[in-house]
Image: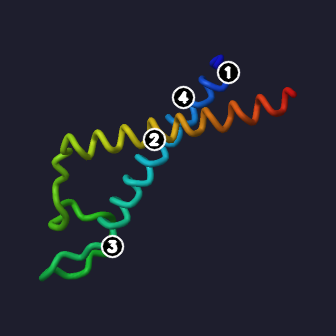
Amino acid sequence: MRLNKRVGIETIIVSFIFILLLVVWKIAQGMFLTLQHVPQGTPLQTSGAASQVDFGHVASGSGLMITLSVGGIFLLAIAYYVVRSYVVGKNKR
């Protein structure tokens, strides 16, 4: 099997875009949750995000979760490369 350099570079770019979109989504979720949160015992704030948030948990970043995340991205990249190589090869015939 011969590797296609153009499809390989495209796969890397698509993978980075996917990771970037996931990070932006998580940031947007956090901002939305912070804006919607009203701490108990305080009057409703009408402007801006709270400066301190008293809900949620701190993710420890366990090795298993990081391994599964990296492995999942890697598998998605391989699947994308295989499908794109097949489509490009089929179009050349």
Q: Element type at marker 1?
A: helix
Sequence-wise, which precedes: disc 3 or disc 4? 4
Q: Are marks 1 and 2 in contact (CB under 8 Å)?
A: no
Observer-nearest of 1 and 12: 1
Instruction: Give the spatial CA distance, label 1 vs label 2.
Output: 20 Å
Sequence-wise, which precedes: disc 3 or disc 2? 2
Q: Which residue is mark 1?
A: 6
Categorize mark 3 by other alpha carbons within 10 Å: few (<14), some (14-19), many (20+). few
Q: Which residue is mark 3?
A: 36
Q: Are marks 1 and 3 in contact (CB under 8 Å)?
A: no
Nearer the viewer's eye, disc 3 or disc 4? 4
Q: Which residue is mark 2?
A: 19
Q: Residue at x 87, y 28 (%)?
A: 93
Residue 34, horizontal then vertical, whole percent: 29, 65
Residue 71, horizontal then vertical, whole percent: 38, 38
Sequence-wise, which precedes: disc 1 or disc 2? 1
